[in-house]
Amino acid sequence: MSTAISHDAETREPFALAALLFLLCALALAFPWLSGRVTVPWDAKAHFLPQFAFLAHALHSGQSPFWTPNVFAGMPQIADPQSLIFAPFFLIAAALVPEPSFVLEDAIVFAMLGMGGLALMAYFRDRGWSAAGGLIAALAFAFGGSAAWRIQHTGQVMSLSWLPVTLFLLARALDRGSVAYGAAAGAVAAFLVLGRDQVAFLSVLTLVAYALYRVATDDAPAVTAIAPLLAGAAVGAAIIAAPLAFTLELAANSNRPEIDLDGAYKGSLPPASFLTLISANMFGTDGPLAAFWGPPVGEKDLYLARNMTEVYAGEITIVALVAAFGRRFFADKDARFFAGALVVFALYALGRYTPAFAFLYHIPGVDLWRRPADATFLFGFALAILAGYGLSLVERGEAKPHPAALAGAIAALFIAAATHAGVHAHLAQAAAPLAISAAFAIASVAVIALTAAGKLRGAALLCALAALMTADLAVNNGPNESTALPPGQFDVLRPDSKDPVIAFLKERLKENAAPDRRDRVELAAIDFHWPNATLVHGLDHDLGYNPIRLKIFEDATGAGDHLALPDQREFSKLYPAYRSPLSDMLGLRYVATGVPIEEIDKRYRRGDLAELTQIGKVHIYENKNAFPRVMVATCAMHVDFARMIETGEWPEADYRETVLLEQPPLCHTRKDLPPDATRARIVSYGNAEVVVEAHAPPGGGWLILNDVWHPWWFATLDGREVELLRANVLFRAVAIPEGRHEARFSLEPIRGLLKEKWRR
C-alpha cells in the first residue's frame, strides 16, 4: 500500500474543517488556564516560570542570559536544558514581553501542543487517512495522556510538541525525495533535541527508527532517501552543535553524569497504571492526595507522583482501536511501525516490571535519564496515531466491527478495572469514576457503530467526534490538583509581588548594601515554588531548585535539587551547619525558613544566627558574619580541595585575610596594616561580567570574588589576561600586585568549552 495520498483523496477529506474544529476544541479545553482562573502549577511555576522571567529580564536589561548569579551561587544557563534559551517560543516571548505572566507561560505550552496536533493532522492527510481520524489523534495527542496529566513538566511537553512536526516533515521528505523538506525536518528536529530531556531522547530514537524503517520498506529505491536525510542531518547538526556541546560538558561536570540501572528502576511505571486508559480517575488521581489509592501506592522504592501514572486519552481512542483491530489493521506499514513503537514504549515505561528495560538500558544514552515512566509521553503519541488510524479504517469500511461484539469487548475492559478496584477494597470509591467513563464509552461505541454503518459521515461525524472528545477530556482530564491551581497561590513569583517576606528581604538587603557587598539569601522549607523565586526578583540565592547542579558546588555544600521541605535542605561534611566558614564565604546574610531553623539544621545552637522576625510561618535569620562578595586577601595557604571535601576539615586561618589555593603558599600578612590597606569594591555586576576595583598593600595579594568557580569564566587585570584561580574550594580569585587595579571577570563559554576539550 502506498503511503502517499492521491489528489482525489486529498479533496475528499475535509481536513480544513477538522483543523478548525481541533482549534476550537483546543481553545475550549485550555480556557480554564487561558482565562487566568487557574494556572499550571508545580514545576511549571516552581522552575520554568522563574527561568522564563530571568530570560526576559536579561534580554530587556541588555544583559547576557547565559549565566545567572541568582541560584546555586551561579549557574551556566547556556548549558542548562531547562533555561529556555534554546526554546524558540519562549525566547521570542521573552524578547517581546519584559515581564512574562502566568497566562503567557501557560498559553505558550498549549500553543505548542496545538502546533503538534495540527502537524499530526497534516501527517494523516499525507498518509491518506481520514480527517476524522486526524481529529481524534490530534485531540488525544494534545489533551490526553501525559501531555494533559504532566503538563507541568514544561520541558518534556515542549519536546513532545516538536515530535509530530518533525514526523510530518520527515515523512513528506521521504515520500517526495525532497531535500527542502529534509532540511526542514532537520531544523525542527534540532529544536526537539535542544529539549535535552528523556522525551526528546526517545523522540529522536523514534524518528531515526522511522527513517530506517521507511528506507527498508518503501517501494522507491533507498538511494532516493539519501539526499533528504543528509540535508536534515546537516541542518540539524549545525543548529544543535554548540548548545549540545555545552550541555554535555555540563553533564560531565554535574551531579548526575549518569543514572545506574537500579536508580532508573525507581522511576518505573507500575502495570496497573494502564487501567487509566479505561478510566482516568478510578484511582482518585484528581481528588485529594489522601484519597488516592492507585500506583505507586504500596510499591517499594518507586519515586513517581500520582499524575505520572495517568495515560487516559479519551474513551474514543480505546473504542476505535478495539473496533479496528484485526489483520487489516496491520496492512499499512506506518501503522505497523507505530504499533511496534507502542509496545516498545510500554515496555520501556514499565521499567523493572519486565526484563525489557534491562536490555534497553544498554542503548547509548539511556543511562542519562532517571525515570523510564517518561516513556508514557511517547506511548500517548503512538496511541493517538493508532486510534486515529483505526477510526479511518472504520469510516472507510475497511474494518467492520459488530456493535454487540464491540460493546462486549469494551464492557470486559470495564469489568477488569472494576475487579481490580474490588480486589483492592476500593470498588465503592472507583464506582463513580468508572460510571462516568462508562457513559463516555457507551457514547463512543454508538459513534463508532453509526460510523461503521455509514450513518455518520463528513461534517456530521467531525462535529460529533469534536463534541464527544471535548466533553470527555474536559471531564476526565480537566483541571485538577496536579495540573491547575489558583494563580494567587504563586503570588511570590510575580515581579510585583507584595509578599511580605520578599519585601522584608529586599528592604534589609538595601539597608545593608555596600560597595563590596552583594549578599545572598536562602529560602528553605517555605513551599514548593519558593526556591527559584530569586530568579524573578533578582536576588542571589545560595541554593535553588534544579535537578542539575554543578558537581563542584554539590560536593562542597551538599546542595540537593530542592529545599521545599525541611529534610530537603542537605548539608555536607565541609558545610555541616549554617554556622560554618562556607556560609560566611558564600555571603549568606539572610535565611528564611518555613519552620524553626532547628528543624532544618540539627547542629544549630541558639545565637548561631540572629533571629530578626517571623512573618506568618516564615522565620527570618541574619548571619552577621557573612563575607562581602569581593575582598582582598594577603596570605595564601596551599590545600587539597578534594581532601577538604572528603574530610570536612578547614585549616585554621583568618579567612578575611587568607585564601586557600591549590598552589604553593605565599604569605604577606601584616598585622600593622591600616584597615583600608586591602579593599575592594564592585564597579559593575552583570550576569556575565563583573568588574571590581581592588587595592593591595606592598607585596600584593589576591582578589577574591565569592561566586562559584567555573572553567568558562576568565579574568583580566588592568586589561591584561591573568589566571583565574579556584579559591576557598568553590570561588574565584586572581593574584594582584601592590596598588590599585581593575579586575574584570567575564563569561566566555565557547572559549571555555574549547579550552576544556583541548586540555583533555
Image: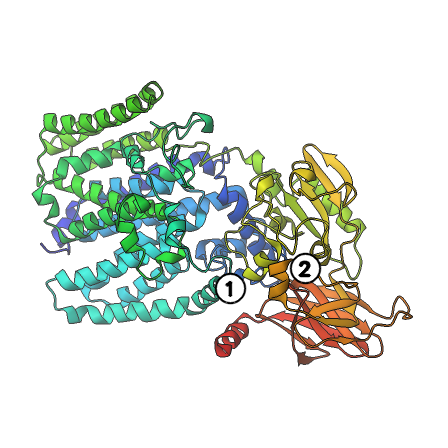
Instruction: Judge from the rendering whether residue 715 lies leftward or rightward of residue 328; answer left or right.
Output: right
Instruction: Judge from the rendering whether residue 475 lies leftward or rightward of residue 359; answer left or right.
Output: right
Report how far apart the C-alphas of labels 2 and 1 lie in the structure.
Answer: 24 Å
Q: Position of residue 51 (x, y in %)?
A: 54, 52
Please identify the quarter of the rendering in which residue 418 is found: top left
Within 10 angstroms of label 2, few (less than 14), some, or many (20 or more) residues?
few
**Residue 357 shows in this picture:** yes
Please identify the quarter of the rendering in which residue 500 is found: top right
Residue 649, labelled with which disc?
A: 2
Q: Residue at x 46, y 37 (%)?
A: 33
Residue 419, labelled with which disc?
A: none
In front of the other: 539 or 414? 414
**Residue 117 shows in this picture:** no
In front of the other: 178 or 79? 79
**Extreme residue toward the top, this view:** 428
Kindly identify which residue carries mark 1: 253
Using the image, determine if residue 632 lies above or below residue 535.
below
Q: Quadrant of the N terminus?
A: bottom left
Within 10 angstroms of label 1, few (less than 14), some, or many (20 or more) residues?
some
Using the image, determine if residue 636 lies above or below residue 618.
below
Q: Position of residue 581 (x, y in %)?
A: 72, 56
